């Protein structure tokens, strides 16, 4: 099987994943108790619901397309997803393309920078902890990562905010300023979410890198390289890391797909108008088009990132490349 055939098969499998994900959320939202038209007219508390005209409710359902059979509603959604006609929010009446254009870039920026920060922290610490196994540095890293894994992200973000406000009398600017217009304010606004999320992600990454490096250091080909008289740094860089980083790379790719799906806690703590908050608000208001589109986008990003990771495996590892030929 060629690389092209392998890629096509993975893409077809990814399309199935997206369809299953969107179908699941579509049915879940539609079959949940309650009437969306009644919610929109009477409010969350249902005040005045008894005095509403049934004809008005029927008109609202018709305008929203809720009076169509479920299968036809889902096919309309899939058709719009393919053609790019994503519709508009039931509540804000804004085109969904505009909503995504306003919110997706900041979520992507924070997710990528957070993952990069996690690697910057985890790679040297994980390698040093493995190389100096059993020493004081290794013990310190394990204690710190254990504490880090036990701290919730929202609590860590709150602690950082409190430390800056109380200790330094500084509060990051509210909202998000465009980088091109106010680069300094933009960097101040994304720095705290990136540092918070990056530090939280680094704890598990350190442990994984340490474990993989330790396992690879015991492989026969590493012992052979040392027996040939190669410098320890050469053995580590050219023989150990190339194989030890495959598992962390896969883990990072899967995690990045989740992050791009919406960093809800970080966006909430730091008041970031990203994709995660858009999804949470849409679920609370039962804004069907927004929820369906965001879930479809999340699934597509997850599939795409995993495909990129798998192709990177093929490029890096000759054993994987031989399996698909």
Image (tube, rainbow, N blue to C red):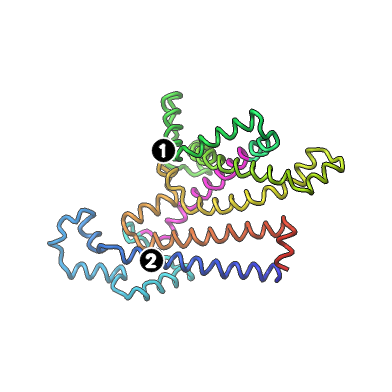
Q: Which mark is residue 174?
A: 1
Report the residue that reaches farthest toward the right. Answer: 228
- Taking depth in this image into account, of 137 and 201 the one nearest to the observer is 137
**Magenta span has 57?**
no
Tell whether 261 sits left or right of 134. left
Label 1 Cα crowd, 10 Å radius (few <14 / some 14-19 / many 20+):
few
For the point 64% across and 28% down, which residue is it?
136
For the point 53% across and 54% down, which residue is it?
257
* Mark in the foreground, 2 or 1: 2
- Taking depth in this image into account, of 44 and 10 the one nearest to the observer is 10
Tell whether 140 sits left or right of 46. right
Where residue 255 sits: x, y (%)?
54, 51
Q: Which mark is residue 230?
A: none
For the point 43% across and 51% down, which residue is it?
276
Q: Which residues are magenta?
A: 94-122
Where residue 169 sits: x, y (%)?
43, 25
For the point 16% across and 60% down, which residue is it?
49
Where residue 216 sits: x, y (%)?
71, 46
Location of the C terminus (image quadrant)? bottom right
Report the residue that reaches farthest toward the top. Answer: 167
The reply to whether the C-beta atoms of the residues labelled 2 and 1 are less than 8 Å apart is: no
The tag earlier along the polypeptide, 2 or 1, is 2
In the depicted structure, whether residue 161 falls above or below residue 54:
above
Label 2 Cα crowd, 10 Å radius (few <14 / some 14-19 / many 20+):
many
Tell whether 181 sits left or right of 306. left
Q: Magenta region's main secondary structure?
A: helix
Location of the N terminus (image quadrant)? bottom right
Q: CA distance from mark 2 to mark 1?
A: 34 Å
Residue under label 2: 26
Per the image, label 2 sits on a secondary structure element best described as helix
**Magenta span has 96?**
yes
């Amino acid at each position: 099987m060629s690389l092209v055939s392998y890629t096509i098969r993975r893409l077809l499998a990814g399309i199935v994943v997206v369809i299953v994900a969107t179908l699941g959320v579509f049915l879940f939202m539609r079959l949940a108790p309650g009437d969306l038209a009644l919610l929109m007219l009477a409010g969350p508390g249902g005040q005045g619901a008894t005095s509403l005209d049934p004809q008005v409710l029927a008109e609202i359902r018709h305008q929203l397309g809720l009076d169509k059979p479920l299968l036809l509603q889902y096919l309309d959604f899939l058709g719009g997803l393919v053609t790019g006609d994503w519709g508009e929010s039931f509540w804000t009446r804004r085109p969904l393309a505009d909503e995504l254009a306003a919110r997706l870039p900041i979520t992507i920026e924070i997710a990528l920078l957070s993952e990069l920060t996690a690697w910057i922290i985890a790679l040297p610490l994980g390698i040093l902890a493995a190389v100096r196994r059993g020493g004081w540095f290794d013990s310190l890293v394990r204690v710190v990562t254990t504490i880090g894994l036990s701290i919730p992200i929202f609590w860590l973000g709150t602690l950082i905010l409190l430390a800056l406000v109380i200790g330094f009398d500084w509060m990051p600017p509210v909202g998000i300023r465009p980088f091109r217009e106010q680069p300094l304010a933009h960097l101040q606004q994304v720095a705290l979410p990136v540092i918070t999320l990056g530090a939280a992600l680094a704890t598990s990454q350190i442990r994984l890198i340490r474990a993989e490096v330790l396992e690879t250091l015991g492989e026969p080909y590493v012992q052979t390289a040392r027996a040939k008289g190669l410098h320890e740094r050469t053995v580590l860089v050219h023989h150990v890391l190339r194989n030890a980083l495959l598992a962390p790379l896969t883990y990072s790719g899967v995690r990045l797909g989740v992050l791009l799906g919406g960093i809800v806690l970080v966006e909430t703590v730091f008041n970031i108008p990203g994709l995660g908050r858009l999804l949470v608000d849409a679920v609370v208001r039962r804004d069907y088009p927004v929820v369906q589109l965001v879930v479809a986008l999340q699934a597509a990003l997850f599939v795409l990132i995993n495909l990129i990771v798998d192709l990177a495996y093929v490029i890096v590892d000759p054993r994987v490349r031989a399996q698909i030929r």
